[in-house]
Image (cartoon, coloured by chain):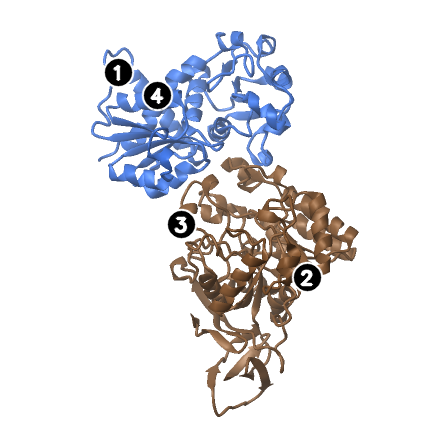
Chain colours: A blue, B brown
Amino acid sequence: MRRHLLESADLDRADATLVLDTAAQIESALAGREVKKLPTLRGRTVVNLFFEDSTRTRISFELAAKRLSADVINFSAKGSSVSKGESLKDTALTLEAMGADGIVVRHGSSGAPHRLATWVAGSVVNAGDGTHEHPTQALLDAYTIRQRLGRLEGVRVVITGDVLHSRVARSNVWLLHTLGAEVTLVAPPTLLPVGVGSWPVTVSYDLDAVLPQADVVMMLRVQGERMNASFFPSAREYSRRYGLDATRMAKLADDAIVMHPGPMNRGMEIAADVADSPRSTIVEQVGNGVSVRMAVLYLLLGGPA
Amino acid sequence: MTLLIKGAQPYGEDAVDILVRDGVIAAIGEDLSVSTGRTIDATGLVALPGLVDLHTHLREPGREDTETVLTGSRAAALGGYTAVHAMANTDPVADTAGVVEQVWRLGGDAGLVDVVPVGAVTVGLGGTQLAELGAMADSAARVRVFSDDGKCVSDPALMRRALEYVKALDGVVAQHAEEPRLTVGAQMHEGDRSARLGLTGWPAVAEEAIIARDVLLAEHVGARLHVCHVSTAGSVELVRWAKSRGVEVTAEVTPHHLLLTDAQAEGYDATFKVNPPLRTAEDVAALRAGLADGTVDAVATDHAPHAGEDKECEWSAARPGMLGLEQALSVVVDTMVDTGLLTWREVADRMSVRPARIGRLAHQGRPIAVGEPANLVLLDPAARAVVDPAALASKSRNSPYAGRELPGRVVHTLLRGELSVLDGKVQK
């Protein structure tokens, strides 16, 4: 394993499989235990450095670190020195001086974790940077697919939504490709990046056409405000063309699953009855997120102190 | 004052002695000698007319923490320049006779290069109202180049009026070609890399659409247009097309766009964030070809000093721009001379003669000939050195060439017969 987890594009198949296998081992080690805690990272300090609000991801990392017995500090940019204009570099050097072994960073600027990694000695875990990557989300998604379908090789995954602005989409494209899955991106052309042609994916503008062949449908959150910049005419038209409702879901194969990284816009990209259907893995994804993040922290920080 | 330069090779041709007296080239020949004055041995050095930069950010007034007219003049002299055009996006903006005269006077005080102020096209670079272009032209600074550089004069009606108005001043509008509605939040060249890196794209079309519009406007009103820092293959094509129609358009390319590509954005080191952004290898090849065939008239540095904290940060928070004055000639040697794309005479044409003509500088960009002003650079084309930002004369350190080995060392620079640089050391 590398020193940092900055992007899933960095992970080769062996690295990625190791994370998934480690997560599975951790899950079975804790299964049925009364005290859901391992002593692995006792004495290590993990800082959750969140420059953007993300309660779910922060809580997931916090729980993961605590279950490994690490000391956890939550550093939220709001109400801190950062809101008074402190630079990312000065924040990094401060955390470094305090002896952080691992820094879990969420930042609105693509590449901020990469910069951070050049300024600190500890390990940096990217918990989402701008519109770039969110590698632990992709790892937990891959873990969930493997758990449900028993494999990743050859699995046909359709990712639908605002690919242009989605770090989840980018991380999933690279990781799923590395793990042998076949990815199809579906979006209105306005929400696909120029340059998507160089990605190892198939691109379609027609959700109905690709659903019958899909093993997995992953719905991305779409912000209704995007219509203000003319990415689509209206939320209603978006939902009609690219939302997953019960009628569309009926086109899926019997064992196909529906995923969403959350938080959902019910009624926009996903209908409530789809989100709550047995095909939906949305709640499992949350639980698996903790196991996968434990695996990541263990692999990065679990070596000799 | 008398200076004898022994054994220099004008334009890389046969070695001769050059005698400089009272700021003028007094004699050129073999085995010249003088009884008084200084003699410098220039054996193996190429002599070119002093370089002229159409595009320099000297940051004074307003950001003297990053560069001053003096430190920028030192950097320019060390780069072989004898004249630089100081861009107008200072604080306050150079949009009045008062500000351009202040910059011009500071340049005179520094005394290392001719500092030629550029005047803003619009008040405060606001893009809505013409600045007093005539007052700046008539001032002691004698402004002939007008630019809102850093911002595009995007309003087509205003651009038309500016092009028309400066005809009376023998001036030129130097356009920063960037359609602002197509570059909202833009961070890097829009293409395969921006898609993967998750950085908002700056599409080539945002530059090309403005150039296409402006060459047609210039043709329509019969005015001169200069296009700043062309960065795409399409821009070169448009300029070539416009010239073939007889439009009075000129264009410049920066050293960094001749050498570097968007691959530099990998790793998110904001030293490489620049506007217009670094483009693809295909664009670099087209820019080199355009400079070689003369479609692109000039190399201009877009020297843009920035404070450390404005670069040592998240990419999207960083200011765009990079240093250029001290390495421009080396980059041209590397990309254009050593590759066989330009002769030394053509280097002189693109880095001195044509920029001086575009800026209407009568005493710069002159040939190396008897009776001409002694504005000269002497360089060692064979010397190679690794760029160390800490060793630069600029007040800032944001060089994109840090750690890169480049050929061509400026050994001496003369401004009107005075050594501004001797043995690679600036004299003031």
Residue type, numbered disc 2: Gly
Residue type, numbered disc 1: Lys
Q: CA distance from mark 1 to mark 2?
A: 72 Å
Say above or below: A297 vs A279.
Answer: below
Q: Are callouts 2 and 4 both on one chain? A: no
Report the front residue among B68 and A92: B68
**Is any atom of residue A22 visible in this view?**
no
Q: Quadrant of residue B22?
A: bottom right
User: In the rendered view of the protein, which quadrant contains the C terminus of chain A?
Assistant: top left
The residue at 22%/35% (across/down) is A304
Say above or below: B413 vs A270.
Answer: below
Which chain is mark 4 on? A
Image disc number at residue B294: 2
- Mark 2 Cα-neighbour bin, 10 Å: few <14, some 14–19, many ≥20: some
- Would you say B169 lies left or right of B412 here? right
- Would you say B66 lies left or right of B214 here? left
Q: CA distance from mark 1 to mark 3?
A: 47 Å
Which residue lies under the disc numbered 4?
A59
- Mark 3 Cα-neighbour bin, 10 Å: few <14, some 14–19, many ≥20: some
Residue contact at pointers 1 and 2, CB within 8 angstroms: no
Image disc number at residue A36: 1
Residue type, numbered disc 3: Gly
**Is any atom of residue B150 visible in this view?**
yes
Q: CA distance from mark 2 to mark 3?
A: 37 Å
Residue A86 % position (x, y) = 36, 38
- Mark 1 Cα-neighbour bin, 10 Å: few <14, some 14–19, many ≥20: few
Q: Are callouts 1 and 3 both on one chain? A: no
